[in-house]
Image (cartoon, grey):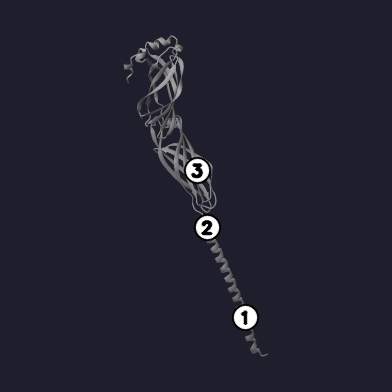
Amino acid sequence: MSSSENPEIVERVFKEKEEKEDKKDEENGGFLKKVKGFVQDIGEKIEETIGFGKPTADVAAIHIPHINLKTAEIVVDVLVKNPNPIPIPLIDINYLIESDGRKLLSGLIPDAGTIHAHGSQTVKIPVNLVYDDIKTTYHDIKPGSIIPYKIKVDLVVDVPVFGRITIPLEKTGEIPIPYKPDIDLEKIHFERFSFEETVAVLKLKLENKNDFDLGLNSVDYDLTLSDVNIGGAELEKSAKLEKNGISYIDLPITFMPKDFGSALWDMIRGRGTGYSMKGHINVDTPFGPMKLPISKEGGTTRLKKNKEDGGDDDEDED
C-alpha cells in the first residue's frame, strides 16, 4: 500500500467517529430536553392544583352573652378562610379594646387551633370587661352611660411558602356601663283587709338612671315591713322603663297583719311605716338581657285602704 492512501483512511475513521459522537449528543440532548419539559409540566400542574394562597379573615359578629353591674362578657366571632390544601395553624391571637383612643383591655390567646384545609372556620375570642377597672382608670366614664369601643384583632398564622403572616382586623360598636335603678315603695294599697289575711298592692316607683331604655320582663323581691319579713314573690310584669326616667308598677302581695303586733295599729292609723326591699329585675336592653339588682334600706311608706274598708281612695291618685 502506498503512503498516499493513509490520509484517506485516517480521515474516514475520524469522520465516522465524529458522526457517532454527534448522533449520541443529539440523542442525549433530546432525552434531557424531554426530561426537563416533563418536570416543568409536572411542576406547573402541581402549582395549578395545589397553589398556596394567603388566608383571609373578617369579624363576623360581636355578642354580649352576659352583662351585669360588674362585668360584660364579649365574644368576637372571626371568620377565617383557608384556601390551601393543608390545614394551617393559628399561632397567636392578639386583641385590644379601646374607647376614644384609650385602652380598656388587651390580651393574647396562644395556640388558638387549626384552620381546616380548603375551608372556613369561625374562631371565637372571649373577652371579659371589668367595669370597676374601667371606672377606676377613667373617672369621666360614668355608670349608666354608653361608650364607643373599637376592637383590634391580630391573627398570626403559619402558611407554607409565605411563612408566618399577621392578619389585622378592626370592629367598632357601643357598650353600656349599666347602673342599677333606684327603687321606692311609695305606698301599700289594701285591696282586701282583715286581721287574718290582707291582700295589698305595692305601689313601686322605679327610676332608670341609664342612658338606654329597660324592657321590664319580671321582678323577684323580698319585703320587710315594720321589721317583719312578709316574704315576696317572683312576678312576670311587662313594662317599659324609659331611659333617665321614672316609672311606676304595681306588685300584688298577701300578708297576715296579726304578725305585726303593736306595729299594726300604726299602720291602721296611716302613720309612716318603715320598710326594706331587695330583689332583682330582669330586663331587655339594646345590648342584650340583664338582671339588675333593686334594693332599699330604711325606707318609709304609707298604708291606704279602699273606701269600702274605711279608707279614702282620692289620696291614692298619682
User: Looking at the picture, how far across and down is residue 125, in whole percent?
Assistant: 49, 40
Q: Pick out the residue farthest to the right.
A: 1
Q: Nearer the viewer, mark 1 or mark 3?
A: 3
Q: How many marks?
A: 3
Look at the numbered discs 3 and 2 and tell me whether their residues touch, using CB distance below 8 Å. Answer: no
Q: In terms of sequence position, does the residue under pointer 1 or pointer 3 come before the other?
A: 1
Q: Look at the image and tell me in which quarter the N terminus lies.
A: bottom right
Taking depth in this image into account, of 146 and 312 the one nearest to the observer is: 312
Q: Is residue 111 left or right of residue 190?
A: right
Q: CA distance from mark 3 to mark 2?
A: 28 Å
Q: CA distance from mark 1 to mark 3?
A: 75 Å
Query: Mark 1: which amino acid?
Result: Glu
Taking depth in this image into account, of 111 and 286 the one nearest to the observer is: 286
Answer whether residue 157 is visible to the viewer in this image: yes
Residue plotted at (46% across, 16% down):
229
Q: In the figure, residue 223 lies in which quadrant?
A: top left
User: Looking at the picture, how far across and down is residue 285, in whole percent?
Assistant: 40, 33
Query: Mark 2: which amino acid?
Result: Thr
Q: Look at the image and tell me in which quarter the C terminus lies.
A: top left
Near mark 2 (Cα within 10 A), the count class, few <14, some 14-19 or many ≥20, is: few
